[in-house]
């Protein structure tokens, strides 16, 4: 594994896991809607789950890809775990996108 791969894997894991921790911390355990960079972050628990899955799936999966020999049982198991984590991240991203209340502009009110 090259040094660039290692750095990118660590950055992906650390950034996503840190953002998940900030979401949970600022939302007081998911009870309030936190503001990060001046923007409201609705559904903080769902977003934190998404970032944790992305961080673990991309970062840790990327780091551990060279631990097992190719096409071994451990390699296959790791690949399947990473796929499940990334699929869970995708599902939570879609859920947060559809559940997020969006303001409706009323053109007749203008």
Image (cartoon, rainbow, N blue to C red):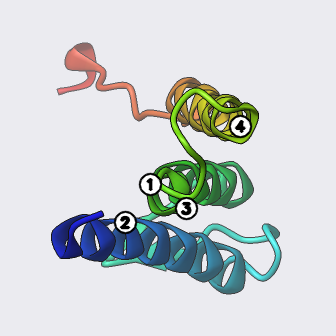
Q: Are marks 2 and 1 in contact (CB under 8 Å)?
A: yes
Determine the secondary structure under disc 2: helix
> Which quadrant is home to the N terminus?
bottom left
Pick whichever, 48 or 88, lies toward us: 88
Name which residue lies at 32% across and 77% down. 38
Instruction: Give x and y (percent) for residue 109.
Output: 26, 24
Cα distance, mark 3 to mark 4? 11 Å
Q: Earlier in the sequence, mark 4 or mark 2?
A: 2
Instruction: Give x and y (percent) for residue 68.
Output: 60, 49
Against 101, residue 7 (above or below) is: below
> Which quadrant is home to the C terminus?
top left
Write down the residue under mark 2: 9
Q: Are marks 3 and 2 in contact (CB under 8 Å)?
A: yes
The answer to which image quadrant residue 23 occupies is: bottom right
Cα distance, mark 3 to mark 2? 7 Å
Cα distance, mark 2 to mark 1? 6 Å
Q: Earlier in the sequence, mark 3 or mark 4?
A: 3
Determine the secondary structure under disc 1: helix
Name which residue lies at 40% across and 75% down. 10
| Mark 4 closeness class: few <14, some 14–19, many ≥20 residues within 10 Å | some
Q: Are marks 3 and 1 in contact (CB under 8 Å)?
A: yes
Cα distance, mark 1 to mark 4? 12 Å
Write down the residue under mark 3: 60
Write down the residue under mark 1: 62
Write down the residue under mark 4: 81
């Amino acid at each position: 594994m090259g040094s660039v791969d290692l750095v990118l894997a660590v950055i992906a894991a650390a950034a996503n896991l840190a953002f998940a921790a900030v979401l949970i911390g600022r939302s007081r355990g998911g009870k309030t809607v936190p503001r990060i960079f001046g923007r409201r972050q609705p559904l903080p628990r769902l977003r934190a789950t998404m970032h944790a899955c992305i961080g673990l799936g991309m970062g840790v999966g990327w780091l551990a890809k060279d631990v097992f020999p190719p096409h071994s049982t451990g390699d296959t198991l790791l690949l399947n775990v990473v796929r499940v984590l990334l699929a869970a991240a995708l599902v939570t991203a879609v859920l947060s996108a559809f559940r997020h209340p969006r303001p409706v502009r009323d053109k007749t009110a203008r």
